[in-house]
């Protein structure tokens, strides 16, 4: 698990930071602001939404992180987060214990794994 790894889906070079201890740096999948329902209804950013978990891609991990690697997708609570901007891109910084689930291609084909840790 490299502490300086970077999500290959972004166009930036390596991040100029290194995560420490049990910290995980993720990039959210859905931009903040208005969104559309499955029926096409526009929901404004100011609309109150119940407590809902969100998915994000792991960009970098600290040396004490054991269960996730850069490139994994994780489920987290958007209310329990710290935002940081690096080179004009918004990321979310959190502790490994604040993650609720992990989804990764490396779990596929494993005899004892369903592909998700809940």
Image: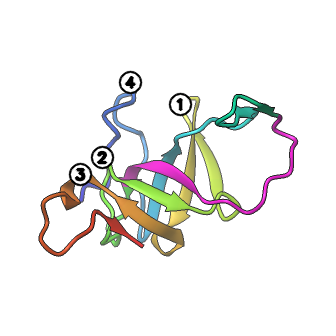
Start-end of magenta stretch: 44-60
> Which of the labelled discs sits on residue 87, or is there none?
1
Q: Secondary structure at mark 4?
A: loop
Q: Nearer the viewer, mark 3 or mark 1?
A: 3
Say whether marks 2 and 1 touch (CB < 8 Å).
no
Residue, far top = 11
User: Is residue 35 part of the magenta span, yes or no?
Assistant: no
**Which residue is pictured at 19% across the width and 56% down the height?**
106
The one nearer the camera, 50 or 40, is 40
Q: Give the Cα distance between marks 1 and 4.
A: 11 Å
Q: Earlier in the sequence, mark 4 or mark 2?
A: 2
Q: Earlier in the sequence, mark 3 or mark 1?
A: 1
Vertical order, 89 against 92 (above or below): above
Q: Give the Cα distance between marks 4 and 2.
A: 13 Å
> Which of the labelled discs sits on residue 105, or is there none?
3
Q: Which residue is mark 2?
A: 5
Vertical order, 15 against 60 (above or below): above
Residue 104 lies in quadrant: bottom left
Q: Earlier in the sequence, mark 3 or mark 4?
A: 4
Q: Secondary structure at mark 1?
A: loop
């Amino acid at each position: 698990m490299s502490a300086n790894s970077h999500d290959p889906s972004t166009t930036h070079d390596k991040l100029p930071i290194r995560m420490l201890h049990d910290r995980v740096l993720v990039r959210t999948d859905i931009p903040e602001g208005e969104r559309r329902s499955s029926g096409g209804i526009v929901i404004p950013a100011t609309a109150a939404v119940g407590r809902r978990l969100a998915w994000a891609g792991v960009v970098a991990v600290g040396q004490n992180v054991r269960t996730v690697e850069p490139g994994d997708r994780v489920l987290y609570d958007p209310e329990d987060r710290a935002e940081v901007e690096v080179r004009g891109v918004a990321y979310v910084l959190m502790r490994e214990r604040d993650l609720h689930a992990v989804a990764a291609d490396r779990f596929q084909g494993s005899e004892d794994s369903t592909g998700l840790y809940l």
